[in-house]
Image (cartoon, rainbow, N blue to C red):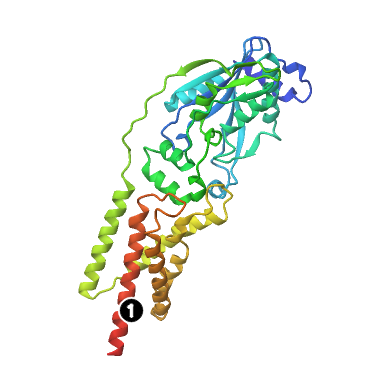
Amino acid sequence: MKKRILLFAILISSFHLSAQFLALSDSASISLITCDPADRVYALYGHTALRVTDSVNEIDVAFNYGVFDFDTPFFIYRFAKGHTMYVLGTTEFENFLREYIRRGSGVTEQILNLNPGEKQRIWEALLENHLPQNREYLYNFFYDNCSTRPRILIEKEIEGVIEYPDILPKTTFRKLIHYCNRNHRWLIFGIDLALGAPIDKPIGQEPQLFLPDKLMEVFAQATIVSPDGNSRKLVASTITLVPSHPAGNTPKDTNPQVICWILYAIILLVTIWEIFRKKYFRWLDIVLFAIYGLAGCVVAFLSFISIHPGVYPNYSLIWVHPFHLIVAFALLYKPYSKFVGFYMGINTIILLLFLPAWKILPQVFNPAFLPLAGILTVRSIRYLLLLMTKTNKSKS
């Protein structure tokens, strides 16, 4: 083991000095490794890596484009803004496999049907990408990740072109995300709030290959067409290294839609009670509009500041936006009651227009958003009724 690690370190450091030193033997092989999703937020989409084996040179290493450091300063902020840096990592394949066994993920190996020249070019390209000045890259969930990078590298280094079978039906990024997170409905709720209309546009097969399981499925039937017109299968053989474990179909968490409708019912009943008792819970509106305003700040940040490709435009800003926070502060002071009344009037009109336009707008909204928007509507109307009552009293 120590000998192999030392040899690999020497190969990495010597790449820029002597390409001949890195020559793979005839027994070498390069494989696409696909790991099943695991029940962790960062592992719900599965994983892709490349494996290079060479028994003569005692090489068996995994190249992994999915390495990140959660302890990086301001990691959450950088991730939200779209400035997350990922790294091409390398490890002995035995250690790589052990990690995914520990997670409970199935692991499939597709040994690629490559000639010696293609293997050598891919090997050298991986080594070059692993150099300190090259190994870091700006991660993009949809277009530049652990699945897209190996595919593009292979396409670039083979002799000819890869022809993929058109086997994946058109869909949307949101549908794919929903499926991957199907057992985590609150996570889907948050994703639906954060991501906007771009992820609802129909996509063909190639964009779907950002998901490891889709890439594996397409690779299985792909062919390499050489410049002379000859063709060969891209995958020579497929090996199940770790059996897959069927995922359960029953969601593990509560349904956000049910919880939000219960909240709506509670707010509606409280509001009705206020009207009949001629009371007004100012604190309730302060808390509600503050929460909606803070959530709106997050959505606005993602929509206007983040460079993620799926966040703008986001039509959820119609009902949850930072201006609610201003009203929450204005409610603390009675002199601003006219301003609050004007705001509530505008807000009511916008919300009453938004609700029937639910199915017309070019964005799919989470069903739980409907009762949440309804809560704002009810409280806005309640404030307008309060102002009308005060105005009538002053006139009389």
* x then y, percent, for residue 131: 70, 30
Quarter of the image where the C terminus is located: bottom left
Q: Please, what is the three-letter code of the amino acid marked with disc 1?
A: Leu
Label 1: which secondary element: helix
The residue drawn where x is 51% and y is 16% is 238
Q: Nearer the viewer, residue 37 or 381?
A: 381
Q: Residues within 10 Å of mark 1 (few under 14, many from 20)?
A: some
The residue depicted at 43 percent of the width and 60 percent of the height is 320
Can you tell which quarter of the image residue 88 is in?
top right
Image quadrant for the N terminus?
top right
Instruction: Locate residue 31, reporting x and y percent.
Output: 58, 19
Q: Quick one: which residue is furthest to the front in this view?
A: 229
In terms of image quadrants, where is residue 157? top right
Residue bearing the label numbered 1: 387
Q: Position of residue 99 (x, y in %)?
A: 49, 25
**Does residue 46 appear to the left or right of 163 in the view shown?**
left
